[in-house]
Amino acid sequence: MEYDALILLLRMKIDLTDLRSIAPTFLFCLLCNIALPQDSLTFDSDRRFVESYVVFDEVKTKHISCVRLYRMNSSEESTILSTLRTSKLELRFDDLRGDFNEYRYAFVHCNSSWEIYRETEMNYVEINDSRYVEDVQFSSATATAFASYTVAFPKDGNRFIRSGNFAIQIIDVETDSVIITKRFTVIDPQLNINARVKKTDEVKYQNFKQQLSFEISDPKNKIKDVNGLRVVALKNRSWEITCSDFKPSFVSGNKIIFDYTSNCLFDGGNEYRYFNTLESRSFSSNIIRVSPSKKAAFDIYLETDEPRSFLKYSNMQDMNGRTLYKAESRSISWHELDYSFVHFSLNTEQPMLGFELYLFGEFTMMKMDSAFRMDYNPSLGRYEKTLLLKHGFYNYQYVVKSPYQDGPDEAIIEGSHAETENDYTIFVYYSSMSEGYDQLLGVAHINSSKNE
């Protein structure tokens, strides 16, 4: 085992700047002439150092609200950039303390499983200006005081050197702690993807499951080894409702076909529920009571929802979980949109022992978050949750954390139907020894109804 640690370093081609955090371990192994402990580091498939934990979208403090990542000059959330410098993203968030606080931001680069590469930032992004969040607006004529911060990136003259998975982190300067993490991707568009949602091959699932079929075209012959491909599909932009167990059906020339994908089925789910609080004169009909609030604009009580798992499918237009903060009748600036307490309730009569119930939608970052976990009220026989939310048009649904599956279970409360209209996003990563990281070379967006 002589010089095992040194040999490992040479084989992995690790940058000298990456050795600072692991140098003591390597020096100890070299001096003592012993093998490197196997559990001291984690490596991805390309033998690069990665952190052992996974990056999630998260907010780590209660006074931060309404974290949104937009494509610049668009009202829809977007988390995809291009190395071609054709797009920019804006991260926006509100600080409910209402006064000015100093924030800065940083980026991290991740592999296709969202594990952080342990490397210096200069290896994957070029930034030549300030890292401080300088764009701030204060609330105007609102019952709830807040300061709204915006970060636009990449700025002119800056660029991401690599493609793949990334996260932007907002750091409180006073405490030097990360308070917001928001994930995004950078694509180097080299592959073409032709995809559709089809009737599942599994007959027993045809009434309530959806299946993807797609073909990857490689016109520039970037894929030298098909085993280096990793395909990840997301339903309605949620990194908690995904599948990555795709295997090529066959390869023909520069085309890789994924047709028999029955090992990656998605619950069709149901159309999202909704409510509208954008303007007091046009609150949606499912709002049954509105009263003044001491700490916000209003207390808004939604009609008690009922489970839909045993109901027939009913076609209803939705936004697949999105939230809009723009009124159609008049222009309302972000810092003029007030906050209200919204009261949710779901009638179940009995508590779901061993299960947890969550609100789910873009306002929850499309994930099960403890801040949106509902509590059971035994006196009323229903689950309840009150949230301070910015006025907007909201899509939401109820999902269950179950011990029998990974990720949110949509079917227990909402039901599941093959006819449901859903958005899917397909990400194609390629890992090669020459590049040493997971490149993102193709992205496709498809809809189960349009099948574009």
Image (cartoon, grey):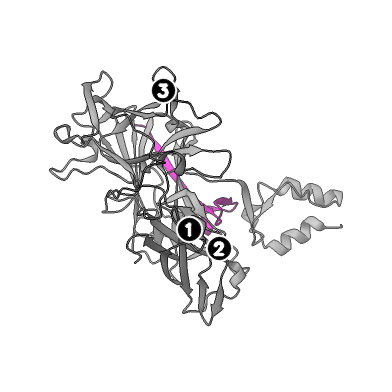
Find residue 374 and report its horizontal and vertical position in percent. 43, 29
Marks 3 & 1, CB-CB < 8 Å contact: no
Residue at the farthest bottom position: 253
Q: Is residue 104 magenta?
A: yes
**Residue 361, above or below 193:** above
Could you say whether the residue bearing mark 1 is in a helix, strand or loop? strand
Marks 1 & 2, CB-CB < 8 Å contact: yes
In terms of depth relative to the viewer, which is nearer, 277 or 68?
A: 277
Q: Is residue 195 magenta?
A: no
Choose mark 3 or mark 2, whichever is in front: 3
State the separation of the CA atoms marked 3 and 2.
43 Å
Could you say whether the residue bearing mark 3 is in a helix, strand or loop? loop
Residue matched to label 1: 233
Find residue 212 and report its horizontal and vertical position in percent. 46, 63
Of marks 3 and 1, which one's residue comes earlier in the chain?
A: 1
Q: The C terminus lies in which quarter of the figure? A: bottom left
Does any portion of residue 410 appear in the rendered image?
no
The residue located at (70%, 49%) in the rendering is 41
Range of residues picked out in magenta: 100-126
**Residue 192, above or below 78:** below
Of marks 3 and 2, which one's residue comes earlier in the chain?
A: 2
Could you say whether the residue bearing mark 2 is in a helix, strand or loop? loop
The residue located at (32%, 63%) in the rendering is 450
Residue matched to label 2: 246
Kind of residue at badge 1: Ala
In terms of depth relative to the viewer, which is nearer, 352 or 368?
A: 352
Residue matched to label 3: 381
Kind of residue at badge 2: Phe
Q: Count neighbours of disc 2 (C-alpha within 10 A) and say few if under 14, some if 14 to 19, many if 20 or more.
A: some
Find residue 72 and report its horizontal and vertical position in percent. 30, 53
Q: Count neighbours of disc 3 (C-alpha within 10 A) and say few if under 14, some if 14 to 19, many if 20 or more.
A: some
